[in-house]
């Protein structure tokens, strides 16, 4: 058994690989729920990073994420950097971002993190935190982390068991066993229980020694690697190879794709925690939810006297127990509704019975099968330089709004099938058009003929906003030939 030092550091590892399908239409493949400000003014990813912001307790965080989300994650982490006492540049506290070329579940993500941490600090401990959880009681969370850290010091693999408040059938459960010798408030794991039927979940709630499986863990890095080597050696071998053959890419570390893809896709629970005799559970009441459905946001939301939760320009009139959200500025009004979920975005409206909120995934899969864009992306599409937003489209034309961050620039590119007109709304634009360089200010415009090499930059100190009018036979995003890209995109 590997014992860790009491002075070993806690390394937060933020896992950001989910797609949040059940929170459609706000959560979408290219911009899933962890990037959205669903419960506060900051995104759930940012709230997770700030939860482990105290440098006296935690090392700088490591984020393991889908490579397609890398620029969004880097920007959101940069935004909360000053709140962690860091400068404006870079991600907070020297955070590292590791890119997964394909999803391989949590056992592999944790293995990559453990290999990185063990090399930096052989006695280091991993605090694995999904990026899309809400924790309302920070003090209780830190107290639970302290209990789990002491269990990890004794070589235990600790998980956090949430004291249940309802007979939830959408969560797995953990049954506690005997107390750990010399460790107050930590217990051996007697059993992991799959998602139960309601009658069984009600019995668990009454028994008092069964807890929701939160999916959060505190693990000694070396001990986790030892257990993974024993139970799932193929996962560890693939992760070692992917790290060894990986490479730095701007501010990211990119795992080698072929090696990482060889890892079996399996969760930490199934790979290690359900098999090892070193598993421990720390029961805690920390105001936790994994925000797995709109009904979960109703549960934790501020309710009016009729039990309604309203966000944005929304009203529930003569209605009870409803969740109403307007994200596009349009008024959403309910009349005579009970236990309904209504979520309106710019391009989609969801109306569902609240008790069917867990069943949105098949609906989204049906939309995907129809070839619709709404499950995949919003009309506002984020890019490393800022974002663009589709405003209007018709026969052989399309109108977009482009917002370019200060100091950012688009790739040097050309199009085979479309020409573009750019009109600056505010800010300053530096435009490369063929051999020319043109400086544009508010209310000035430029025309980019079909096939002309061009680039757009923002040399100013404030965001650049402009209107782009595209015209041509084909207006798809794949009609871009990049010659030079500051962000390393193909």
Image: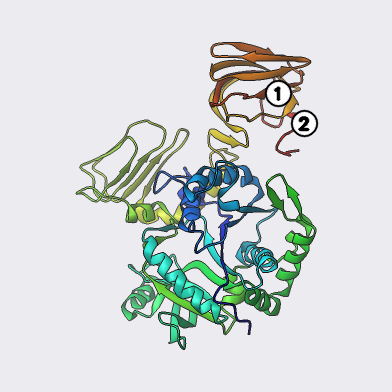
The residue beneath circle 2 is 484
Q: Which residue is drawn at the image coordinates 68% and 63% (left, top)?
A: 116
**Element class at badge 1:** strand
Q: Is residue 395 above or below residue 8?
A: above
In the image: residue 17, left or right of residue 417:
left
Q: Of marks 2 and 1, which one's residue comes earlier in the chain?
A: 1
Q: Which mark is residue 207?
A: none
The number of numbered discs placed on residues in the rendered structure image is 2
Q: Which mark is residue 455?
A: 1
Residue 270 percent across, percent down from the top left? 59, 73
Depth check: give the residue in front, 364 or 471.
471
Residue 74 percent across, percent down from the top left? 59, 45
Depth check: give the residue in front, 96 or 229.
96
CA–CA distance in space, label 2 to label 1: 9 Å
In the image: residue 191, left or right of residue 102:
left
Residue 337 percent across, percent down from the top left? 26, 45
Rendered-image quadrant of the C terminus: top right
- Local packing at callout 1 (Cα closer than 10 Å; few below 14, some 14-19, many 20+) is many
Residue 50 seen from this side: yes
Mark 2 and mark 1 residues within 8 Å of each other at the beta carbon: yes
């Amino acid at each position: 058994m590997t014992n860790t030092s009491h002075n070993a550091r806690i390394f937060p590892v933020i896992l950001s690989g989910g797609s949040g399908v059940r929170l459609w239409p706000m959560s979408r493949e290219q911009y899933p729920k962890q990037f959205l400000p669903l419960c506060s003014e900051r995104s759930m990813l940012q709230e997770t990073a700030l939860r482990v912001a105290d440098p006296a307790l935690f090392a700088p965080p490591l984020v393991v994420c889908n490579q397609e989300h890398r620029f969004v994650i880097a920007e959101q982490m940069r935004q909360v950097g000053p709140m962690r006492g860091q400068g404006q540049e870079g991600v907070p506290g020297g955070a590292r971002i590791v890119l997964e070329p394909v999803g391989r579940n949590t056992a592999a993500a944790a293995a990559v993190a453990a290999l990185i941490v063990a090399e930096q600090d052989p006695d280091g401990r991993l605090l694995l935190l999904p990026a899309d959880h809400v924790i309302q009681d920070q003090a209780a969370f830190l107290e639970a982390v302290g209990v789990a850290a002491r269990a990890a010091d004794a070589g235990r693999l600790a998980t956090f068991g949430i004291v249940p408040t309802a007979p939830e059938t959408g969560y797995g459960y953990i049954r506690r066993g005997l107390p750990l010798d010399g460790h107050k408030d930590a217990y051996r794991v007697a059993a992991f229980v799959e998602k139960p039927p309601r009658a069984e979940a009600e019995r668990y709630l009454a028994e008092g020694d069964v807890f929701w499986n939160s999916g959060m863990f505190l693990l000694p890095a070396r001990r986790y690697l030892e257990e993974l080597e024993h139970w799932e050696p193929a996962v560890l071998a693939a992760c070692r190879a992917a790290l060894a053959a990986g490479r730095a890419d701007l501010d990211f570390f990119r795992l080698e794709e072929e090696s990482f893809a060889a890892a079996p896709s399996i969760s930490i629970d199934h790979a290690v925690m359900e098999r090892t005799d070193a598993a421990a559970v720390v029961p805690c009441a920390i105001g936790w939810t994994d925000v797995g459905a709109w009904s979960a946001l109703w549960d934790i939301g501020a309710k009016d006297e009729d039990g309604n939760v309203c966000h944005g320009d929304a009203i529930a009139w003569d209605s009870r127990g409803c969740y109403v959200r307007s994200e596009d500025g349009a008024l959403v009004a309910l009349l005579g509704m009970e236990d309904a979920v209504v979520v309106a975005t710019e391009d989609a409206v969801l109306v569902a019975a609240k008790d069917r909120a867990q069943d949105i995934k098949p609906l989204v899969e049906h939309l995907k099968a129809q070839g619709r864009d709404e499950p995949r992306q919003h009309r506002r599409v984020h890019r490393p330089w800022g974002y663009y937003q589709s405003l209007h489209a018709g026969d052989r034309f399309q109108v977009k709004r482009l917002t370019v961050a200060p100091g950012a620039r688009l790739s040097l590119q050309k199009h085979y099938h479309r020409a573009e007109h750019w009109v600056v709304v505010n800010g300053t634009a530096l435009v490369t058009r063929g051999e020319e360089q043109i400086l544009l200010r508010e209310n000035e415009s430029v025309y980019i003929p079909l096939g002309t090499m061009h680039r757009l930059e923002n040399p100013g100190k404030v965001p650049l906003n402009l209107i782009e009018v595209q015209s041509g036979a084909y207006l798809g995003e794949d009609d871009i030939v990049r010659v030079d890209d500051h962000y390393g995109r193909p």
